[in-house]
Image (cartoon, rainbow, N blue to C red):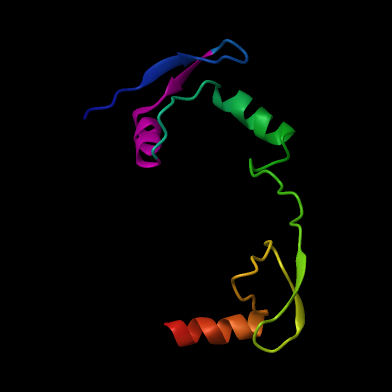
Amino acid sequence: MNLADKTLKCRECGSDFVFTAGEQEFYQQKGLLNQPGRCPSCRAARRQANGGSGSRERAPREMHTVTCAECGTETQVPFLPKNDRPVYCSPCYDKVRVARD
């Protein structure tokens, strides 16, 4: 498929900007279906306002205190354990995982 540069209008500032064939190819490779709605400068300003690189900070994980099913050590895990499944501390989990492989 031949891609050609497209001129789009920024929904933020209303100015025209070019959505290049290279950018369109990148969007296709990443599986992005929508073309950009903001010009590069408005996108950069939005990223900056949201805290930088575009990555959003994750809320701290809720940790749950459990007893390791192998050695009996008290440890914390980032998931709510189910009663029918054993939960291991990190060193014991590594041993169990290696034994399964």
Residue reaching furthest to the left: 1
Identify the residue at horizontal 73%, vertical 86% (top origin).
Answer: 72
**Quadrant in which the N terminus is drawn:** top left
Where residue 16 sits in the image (x, y, percent)? 50, 13
Nearest the viewer among 6 and 66 is: 66
Where residue 18 sits in the image (x, y, percent)? 44, 21
Residue 32, quarter of the rendered image:
top left
Identify the residue at horizontal 38%, vertical 38% (top origin).
Answer: 31
- Residue 49 vs 93, above or below: the answer is above
Nearest the viewer among 57 and 14 is: 57
- Residue 31 vs 83, above or below: the answer is above
Nearest the viewer among 86 and 60 is: 86
Where residue 71 sits in the image (x, y, percent)? 69, 89
Q: How many marks?
A: 0
Identify the residue at horizontal 42%, vertical 15% (top origin).
Answer: 7
Image side of residue 93 versus residue 59, left or right: left
- Residue 75 vs 91, above or below: the answer is above
Q: Magenta stretch: dominant SS?
A: helix
Where residue 89 sits in the image (x, y, percent)? 68, 80
Residue 99 is a magenta residue: no
Image side of residue 48 versus residue 10, left or right: right
The magenta stretch is 16-30
